[in-house]
């Protein structure tokens, strides 16, 4: 008879625990996804009905906006657990990837340990909000709908998220134990002690063994935030913990906990956030229906015969697709799957091919609907509609600069990017006719926002409805494609909104800490001058973009730099355009470069190192664009001034 030793029993027990938690949350996760999906469909329907009734009958859906806000709670939080189980929450793993296995695994697991406790604290505070709403009989203003059930659902979804973290935590602990490496166990123990110390100080700041000057407490807390992020802790959890610890040190633990509970619900129940899942869903419907491929084929028919024509065609298609999708990775995956095989078959240098798609996809942050502009607008309270329109001309200009750069390089070195065949005028016009769904959606979204007929949120709802209607009428979207796009939209939105959910508490901590004033005094003391100041800020964004993705970079830095830029007299819309371009430069900059990582996964014959080498010439395009916007601000301000 074979017996199991204690060394093998521990990993087996932990693996069993991971499987147990996985089974516990499997069915609730599917139920939560169904609830969130139904809420998103209802939100789209309410938005469209409100727009139609207002424009045709001068009336609105009674309580439509408040119901959208309540439904947003379900949409934003219902898929947190599913995203965690897929390990898709946003984290910065540059340090983790550089560590040996014995260190990397306990670092990841230690971060999960900290995140798990943070989510339990968050759930308890949200539940207190639900209790307050129930006890005081608080209802929505127009329809009188009780708000507490929605907040109870929020609590359950966050608890489900915590269970998903616990599942991954148990898996990580099992793997560490199985390694039988004392160094890994020591690192895990250090994480446990550090996490315990952080939470003890957050709840009982009087137990600190030494006194920290008030002016230094904010700086220490934000330094901890950056340290946790670079150590691979979920970005959202790192900001939540920073807010919890920072406000506790500056005011009191009760104020910190109250802030955590109120801000999380305030954010996810803000109907303004409906723009994120709606625009994301619209873009995914367009991709699933094959309209992106039609756009590429049309661009190829028109300019494929030029030097580097295939790469230029993918740039044009990315610009068009970005005006619907709103994020860069969708452009990378869509255009990469379509254009890379074509460029490979024509003998393109694959460094150029991959780099051109990675850079062209960044047009997505400039051409609306841009998620980066939404985040910037939510942080600064600048009009999202004006930010959307402000990005149109810079986006078009960037596409033109990229095409010119590709054409010149291909003309000088024809072997890099051979010409394609010349299409007839008949083929060109026929291909253009097939792009009418994309053009119609662009007109519906941008035209509605520009004329003021709809808000960005309403444009998102109309865009989804229009994309669904066109896809169904043209028989381009299957039922499975519909549900797949719906689920994917919710997962992508959850990963974004949870960051901003805690970023609001983080921003409140920044305001209380006085860090903005300290930074402003430091910069003023340097006597850089107006343009020296903007140059220093832009250089900072290049540096932080090398190590952090666009969204967390925006959330962490805009609360610091926006007040300084406003005091210097810069236009908030113009500054937003510059900042968004700069953080997006990071997605093609080593060592993070998420666009490069994405395109590298699609072209195995080219290493990431070679793709990064291929990207560097395209930095010229970024520098030209930034220089033109700084020298001629009206490039970004002309269209908003007409609104």
Image (spheres, helix red, strand yellow):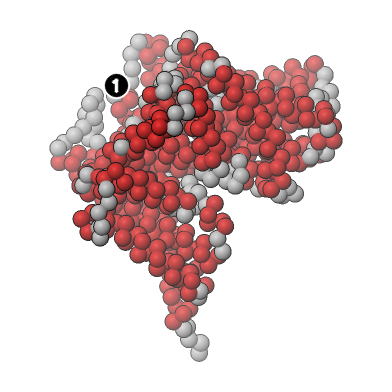
- Residue 592 pos. (x, y %): 57, 46
Q: Residue at x 30, y 40 (%)?
A: 513
Eyeballing the image, is 500 above or below 184? Answer: above
> Relative to the observer, which residue lies in front, 30 or 302?
302
416 horizontally vs 625: left or right = right
Q: Residue at x 43, y 51 (%)?
A: 227
Residue ranking furthest to the left: 136
- Residue 90 is situated, as x and y percent measured from the top left of the image, at 48, 46
Q: Could you tell me which residue is drawn at 28 percent across and 38 percent down?
A: 512
Residue 290, picture quadrant: top right
Residue 428: in sight, yes or no?
Answer: yes
- Residue 152: horizontal and vertical position, in percent? 27, 44
Which residue, given by chain and number where applicable, does mark 1 sit on?
62
Is 348 situated above or below 394?
A: below
**What residue is rendered at 58% in x and 39% in y?**
587
Query: Residue 501, image x and y in percent?
Result: 36, 40
The correct choice, above or below, for 447 with respect to 522 in the image is above
Foreground residue among 537 and 341: 537
The quadrant of the picture occupied by the C terminus is top left
In this rendering, does residue 308 appear at all?
no
Label 1: which secondary element: loop
**Residue that protrudes farthest toward the bottom in the picture:** 1
Number of labels in the image equals 1
Q: Residues within 10 Å of mark 1 (few under 14, many from 20)?
A: few
């Amino acid at each position: 008879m074979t017996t199991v030793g204690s060394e093998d029993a521990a990993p087996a027990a932990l693996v069993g625990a991971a499987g147990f938690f996985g089974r516990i949350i499997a069915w609730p996760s599917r139920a939560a996804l169904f609830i969130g999906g139904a809420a998103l469909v209802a939100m789209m329907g309410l938005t469209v009905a409100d727009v139609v009734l207002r424009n045709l009958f001068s009336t609105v859906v009674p309580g439509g906006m408040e119901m959208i806000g309540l439904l947003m709670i379900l949409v934003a939080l219902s898929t947190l657990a599913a995203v965690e189980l897929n390990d898709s929450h946003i984290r910065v793993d540059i340090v983790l990837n550089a560590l040996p296995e014995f260190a990397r695994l306990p670092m990841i697991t230690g971060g999960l340990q900290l995140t798990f406790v943070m989510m339990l604290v968050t759930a308890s505070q949200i539940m207190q909000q639900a209790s307050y709403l129930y006890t005081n009989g608080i209802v929505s203003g127009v329809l009188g709908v009780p708000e507490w059930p929605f907040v109870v659902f929020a609590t359950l979804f966050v608890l489900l998220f915590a269970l998903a973290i616990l599942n991954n935590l148990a898996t990580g602990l099992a793997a560490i134990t199985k390694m039988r490496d004392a160094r890994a166990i020591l690192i895990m123990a250090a994480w446990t002690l550090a996490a315990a110390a952080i939470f003890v100080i957050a709840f009982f700041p009087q137990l600190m063994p030494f006194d920290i000057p008030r002016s230094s407490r904010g700086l220490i807390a934000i330094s901890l935030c950056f340290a946790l992020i670079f150590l691979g802790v979920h970005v959202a959890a790192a900001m939540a913990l920073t807010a919890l610890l920072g406000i506790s040190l500056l005011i009191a633990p009760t104020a910190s906990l109250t802030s955590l509970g109120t801000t999380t619900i305030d954010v996810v129940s803000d109907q303004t956030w409906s723009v994120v899942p709606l625009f994301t869903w619209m873009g995914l419907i367009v991709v699933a229906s094959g309209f992106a491929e039609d756009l590429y084929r049309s661009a190829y028919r028109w300019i494929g015969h030029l030097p580097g024509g295939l790469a230029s065609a993918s740039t044009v298609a990315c610009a068009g697709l970005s005006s619907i999708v709103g994020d860069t990775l969708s452009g990378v995956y869509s255009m990469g799957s379509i254009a890379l095989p074509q460029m490979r078959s024509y003998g393109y240098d694959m460094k150029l091919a991959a780099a051109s798609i990675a850079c062209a996809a960044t047009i997505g942050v400039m051409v609306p609907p841009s998620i980066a502009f939404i985040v910037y607008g939510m942080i600064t309270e600048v009009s999202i509609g004006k930010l959307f329109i402000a990005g149109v001309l810079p986006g078009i200009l960037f596409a033109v600069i990229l095409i010119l750069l590709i054409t010149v390089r291909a003309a000088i070195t024809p072997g890099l990017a051979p010409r394609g065949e010349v299409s007839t005028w008949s083929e060109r016009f026929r291909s253009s006719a097939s792009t009418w769904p994309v053009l119609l959606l662009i007109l519906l979204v941008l035209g509605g926002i520009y004329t003021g007929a709809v808000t960005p949120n309403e444009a998102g709802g109309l865009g989804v409805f229009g994309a669904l209607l066109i896809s169904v009428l043209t028989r381009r979207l299957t039922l499975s494609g519909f549900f797949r796009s719906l689920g994917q939209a919710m997962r992508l939105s959850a990963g974004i909104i949870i960051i901003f959910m805690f970023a609001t508490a983080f921003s409140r901590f920044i305001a209380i800490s006085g860090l903005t004033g300290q930074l402003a005094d430091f910069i003023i003391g340097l006597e850089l001058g107006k343009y020296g100041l903007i140059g220093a800020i832009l250089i900072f964004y290049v540096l932080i973009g090398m190590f952090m993705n666009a969204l967390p970079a925006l959330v962490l830095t805009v609360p610091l730099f926006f007040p300084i830029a406003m005091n210097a007299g810069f236009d908030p819309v113009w500054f937003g355009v510059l900042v968004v371009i700069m953080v997006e430069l990071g997605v093609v900059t080593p060592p993070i470069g998420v666009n490069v990582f994405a395109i590298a996964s699609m072209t195995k014959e080219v290493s990431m190192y070679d793709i990064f080498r291929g990207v560097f010439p395209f930095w010229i395009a970024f520098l030209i664009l930034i220089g033109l916007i700084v020298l001629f601000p009206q490039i970004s301000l002309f269209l908003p001034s007409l609104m």
